[in-house]
Amino acid sequence: MSNERKLVTVTVDGVQVQVPETFTILAAGNKAGVHIPTLCYLKDVSDIGSCRVCSVEVEGASALQPACKTRVTDGMVVHTDTELVKQYRKLMLQLVLADHGLDSTNYCFSCAKNGACELQALCRELDVTESAFAPSTPAKREPVLEDNPFLAYDPNLCIRCQRCVGACNNRAHNHTLTTGKRGLRTSILAPFGPDWKSTECESCGNCAAACPTGAITEKRRREYRSWEVTRTRTTCPHCAVGCQMDLVAKDGRIVDVEPAWGPSNRGMLCVKGRSGSFDFVHAEDRLTTPLIKNAETGEFEPASWDEALDLVASKFAQIRDENGGDALAAFACSRSTNEDVYMLMKMARTVFKTNNVDNCARV
Ligand code: SF4
Ligand code: SF4
Ligand code: SF4
């Protein structure tokens, strides 16, 4: 029997569960329905165990254990809600807050992530309103990098959780983000400065989606707050991968895209899906009616759908009749439904009289 299948019995806050021995306490807690707060941890992205906010008491252990890094053992008894755990988590969160730094220039109200910031939410959950520790951020604010057209990096807000590094390396497999020294401070070297075009960054934004704070953000987040918007689940209009996403709308206009957990994208998007899939909806020069070119003036003029379809059908029939069916080909869009693609194939074979059929999902 593989390790994956060997089950052990764990008790979390009095709830007994059987889980694979490869599980962490955090995963066992999830199975037991016990909420354990996390900050630097992001499933399948990063588990460096640096923030210690998920610490729990394990009976028999000499110290608190980080739930995201500690494997379960058979008979383990875990307590997640003791006074010691609560005080320790608060202390750890205050250290993170000192790293984040809050002052008159670095302020939740003006941050693009206000309302969607995990650090903010965790401070509320753990009742942390200020830090007992001196800020570890440099006295002089570091410049915000925003030469990338879609993304900005504010190192002053970075808590060095490395979720962005995990997203770029382990999920996007781009290996563009690293950690490095900025003066005395270890920081994230995000490629959004003046030389961003010479980096391997694809502007996919998966790092911004993974960032729990306002450090790496999509610039368009500055245009709305999370409580002002509605979300509609849809499929990316671009390629055959068919990534699932939510269109984010404010006052009837699409202002952003967020990845959803679809079977083919699992919370990821590429740059086209994230940043090229909605601006055209509100474009001033978007075509909203068919246009037919006036043969005399050479200008396109608005037409009805019936007029346009009749014209196209007659032209296809003319080509087929004068040159034979193989003068035509049907090439279907990968974002069409199976049914539409099937119809196009049928039309090509039975009406155009050609077997020249293909689909761009194949390439
Ligand atoms: S935008 Fe994508 S490729 Fe660029 S640093 Fe972020 S995750 Fe990496
Ligand atoms: S940029 Fe965001 S995700 Fe990356 S280390 Fe800083 S806070 Fe964490
Ligand atoms: S997000 Fe990118 S990979 Fe996904 S369907 Fe859209 S274009 Fe394709």
Image: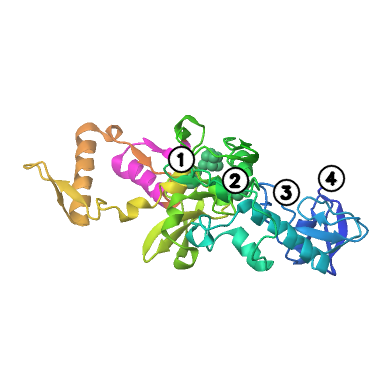
Could you tell me which secondary element the residue under label 4 belongs to?
Answer: loop
- Which residue of the protein is positioned furthest toward the right in this rendering? 60
Q: Secondary structure at mark 1?
A: helix
Q: Secondary structure at mark 2?
A: loop
Mark carried by residue 138: 2
Please say if the residues under marks 3 and 4 sit with CB atoms less than 8 Å apart.
no
Q: Is residue 44 visible?
A: yes
In the image, is 349 to the left or to the right of 363? left
Indicate the quadrant where residue 223 lies.
bottom left
Is the residue indicated by label 1 positioned so its CB lies within 8 Å of ligand 3? no
CA separation in Å, label 3 and label 1: 43 Å
Q: Are marks 1 and 2 in contact (CB under 8 Å)?
A: no
Mark 3 and mark 1 lie on one chain; the one further toward the N terminus is 3
Label 4 sits on residue: 2
Query: CB of residue at label 2: within 8 Å of ligand 2?
Result: no
From the viewer's side, name the closer residue of 94 and 29.
94
Disc number placed over residue 50 in the picture, else none: 3
Q: Residue at point 59% right, 46% down?
A: 138
Rendering colour mode: rainbow
Q: What amino acid is at disc 1?
A: Ala
**Image x and y of residue 112, in percent:** 48, 56
Report how far apart the C-alphas of labels 2 and 4 lie in the structure.
50 Å
Instruction: Answer with mark 2 or mark 4, whichever residue precedes in sequence.
Output: 4
- Residue 180 is situated, as x and y percent measured from the top left of the image, at 63, 36
Residue located beneath label 1 in the image: 361
Distance between mark 1 and mark 4 Cα atoms: 38 Å
Q: Secondary structure at mark 3?
A: loop
Query: Range of the magenta residues?
Result: 340-362
Q: Amino acid at mark 3?
A: Ser
Q: Position of 312 compared to 212: left or right? A: left
